[in-house]
Amino acid sequence: MDSIVLESVSKVFRHRPALFNWMGRERSGETRALQELSLTVQHGKVLVLLGPNGSGKTTTLKLVSTMLLPDAGRVLVEGTDTSQQPEQVRKHVGFAVAGERSFFPRLSARENLDFFAALEEVPRKSRARRIDAMLEHTGLQDAADTLVMKFSSGMYQRLGIARALIKQPSVILLDEPTRSLDPASAAHFWNLVRGLPGQGATVILATHSFNEAVTVGDFVAVLHRNRLAGYRKIAATSVEELRAFYFQTTGEIDESAQLLARGCP
Amino acid sequence: MRLSALLDKMAAILRRDILTGIRYRTGFLLTAAAIVGELAAFYYLARAIGPGFRPQGLDYFAFLLVGTGFYTFLLMGINSFLQIVQEAQQTGTLEILMTTSTPGPVLVFLSAISAFARNSVQLLVYLGAGLLVFGAPLPHPNIGGCVVIFALSVAIAVAIGMFAATLQLAVQKGSAVVWLLGSGAWFMTGTLFPVTTLPRPLRLVAQLIPITHSLDGMRLALLGGADFSTLSRQIAILAGFALILLPLSVLLFSYALRRARLDGALSFY
């Protein structure tokens, strides 16, 4: 069964210049963030989104989360249309956004999670236990009672992941989740993600890391110029094979391969 | 949404706001000092003008106390809606909050109730200090009347606050509403002097501002001890404003939220 379906989804961002813009150079126009994207993610699978900056990865995640609504096409999450019943969709989705800083700075990590757990209607009885488990999963148990304004980027990122998982969603969206994590924490996180499908969750993960993609993904979708450029199964794919697939589908030049060929480390 | 879930969310929001407030330690002291300073200024202003000036037949210091205290309470309540959206836009929490299982209007509404609760404490301290420290007279207040006027005024402030939040979402300029009430409309609502002293055209405009009737009703009930039949005009006008403005503001806010999701403008500020 398909957990997430995108059918010919397009998203355009329109720019309207300020009302009094005589002095400025701001012009009206539009940016096509996604064009006719069609994708499905099966229940309990991990789909990895790869693509250059501005290719539409984050927009895709935001469309699934209902943070954005499509201009054309439709997005279905667990059979529910995000444009028709966004409230229903939000009950299923947990989203860890990139560059996570969206917390209340004068609350501790535990207090922040408690606040969001209440908004997500996590039952009171199991809330404390679940918060402790999430803090442990993300390696934040020692910083549980520290005000988050004292957190490092990596700690923010981990807390964002804990928040996304707190309601035990059936669909988990992760936007560059290991961008600020050290290698050991990233590996720990990959283990965590690999365990999610076993708990019945479907995952979409946007990343620039081929290593991350082959470690956690079941399928990979490559976005390029706001369209789907390639799609394949990851099983038994090496990092090098995925790298080759990526550069072949995007048509971009792999400068790192050229550097390696010239003997640069 | 179940009532228990709603109460649980309300408790979570109150807890967040109390903890955040407590951790801004100096904020309490500064607010207390500002209250005492303002009351002292009004007290000596009333003394300088003399006991002969009795607007609406009331002691002038008591008139100022209720006018400024209640006006500030309502304005801060309205401003809290704007602040909630603005802060959430700036910290990046708005996008995340709007993807939780709690609908956007409910979330903003609950956050504003928390802000009103905090402002109510401040209003009670303000009125208490005016009565106890500066000796404002309070002969026979109609507490029931005060409660009705208070509740209707808060409902209207919620609606105006939702309009401010809508403007903030739509054009990132909700501060215009607060500015309009804080400066342009302020002197027309009878906060510092009776509306009857204004020229006729401004008096007519004043009647269109709901806060004019809030202050009028609150003074009549609290200081004048007016019964419900005397208060019926103010109650009817305030109820009319509330019935029209509340549903309209919720509709507009929901529309602006949907528009922001379409435009990708939730995090713009």
Image (tube, coloured by chain):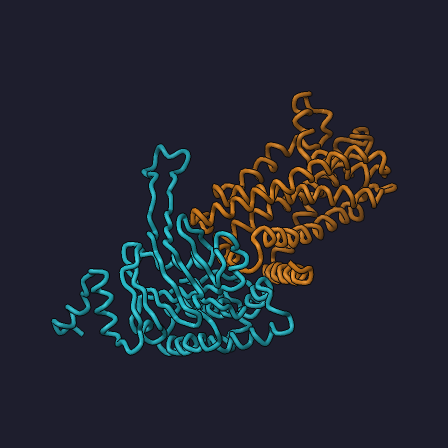
Chain colours: A cyan, B orange
Is residue A97 at all visible to an observer of this figure? yes
Q: How many marks?
A: 0
B189, above or below A119, in the image: above
**Residue at the spot x=33%, y=52% of the render?**
A35
Residue A243 in the figure: left or right of residue B196: left
Residue A232 in the figure: left or right of residue B129: left
**Quarter of the view holding residue B228:** top right
Depth check: B208 or A202 in front?
A202
Residue at far top of view: B200
Depth check: B64 or A119 in front?
A119
A42, above or below B99, in the image: below
Residue at far front of view: A1
A126, above or below A249, in the image: below
Residue B247 in the figure: left or right of residue B224: left
Q: Position of residue B83 (x, y in %)?
A: 56, 49
Q: Position of residue B46 (x, y in %)?
A: 75, 35
Depth check: A25 or A69 in front?
A69
- In the rendered image, the quadrant that contains the N terminus of chain B is bottom right
Q: Position of residue B41 (x, y in %)?
A: 70, 40
**Residue at the spot x=38%, y=43% of the render?**
A14
Q: Where is residue B190 in the image (x, y as percent from the top left)?
A: 71, 32
A193, above or below B38, in the image: below
**Residue at the spot x=27%, y=60% of the render?**
A229
Depth check: B267 or B129 in front?
B267
Is residue B91 at all visible to an observer of this figure? no
